[in-house]
Amino acid sequence: MRYHRSQFVEAAAPLVRPRLPDGAPAVRTALPGEPAPEPTCQALLALPAAEDQVHRTRDFTSRVLDHWCVASDDRESAVLIVSELAANAARHGRSEMTLRLALRRPVLNISVVDTGRPRPTGSSTECADPDEHGRGLRIVEALAHWFDIYETDDSGFQVDVDLLVADPES
């Protein structure tokens, strides 16, 4: 089952067809679960979906994007997106999470999937401070060129985010 981002981001703006910097339509070439063109670079990290593991997703993302010569501003945006998505997966998802980074310039695709055993009922950690809750997907929406959320076959969730990144020469 697919979900429109507005189901997760309160008062989301109407869906706008994304465009690349040159004005060309940013058309995704494949739907989730269908084969897509091979990215120039990709990296994968699988780990327990626990809040004490979120820092590992940030560190991994930063090191990988540095190795791929992604500009520091774009790298910081990607690390923030990954941090928010991993925190959501750790807080609300299943027992495991997988982070996939795929770069096919000018698009960096970030995908976070929660998988594994369902958590026992009531085991999701709720944020005690309401001021610190509910901003993650708004941050992702503000930084992302495009994002989508959908339910996986095993009732987990996958969030795919496209972030436009500058060429290394610029």
Image (tube, rainbow, N blue to C red):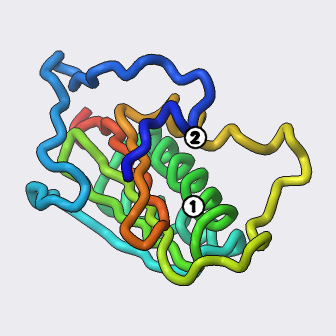
Q: Residues within 10 Å of mark 1 (few under 14, many from 20)?
A: many
Q: Residues within 10 Å of mark 2 (few under 14, many from 20)?
A: some
Q: Identify the residue at horizontal 90%, vertical 53% (top origin).
A: 128
**Could you say which quadrant of the image residue 72 lies in?**
top left
Which residue carries the number 1 mark? 86
- Which residue of the protein is positioned furthest toward the right in this rendering? 128
Between disc 2 and disc 1, whose residue precedes?
1
Residue occupying the point 42% across, 75% down? 45
* Left or right of 15 on screen, residue 105: left
Determine the secondary structure under disc 2. Answer: helix
Going 35% across and 72% down the picture, which residue do you hit? 44
State the count of labels: 2
Relative depth, front residue between 64 and 22: 22
Residue lying at 16% horizontally and 33% vertically, measured from the top left: 27
Q: Are marks 2 and 1 in contact (CB under 8 Å)?
A: no
- Front one among 69 and 108: 108
Amino acid found under the numbered disc labelled 2: Leu
Picture disc at residue 137 = 2
Image location of residue 71, percent across then percent down: 37, 43
Across and down, in percent, residue 52 comes to 71, 74
Location of residue 94 by image quarter: bottom right
Q: CA distance from mark 2 to mark 1?
A: 11 Å
Q: Which mark is residue 8?
A: none
Q: Position of residue 121 (x, y in %)?
A: 74, 73
Q: SS class of the residue under badge 1?
A: helix
Q: Check the picture and name the quadrant holding the C terminus.
A: top left
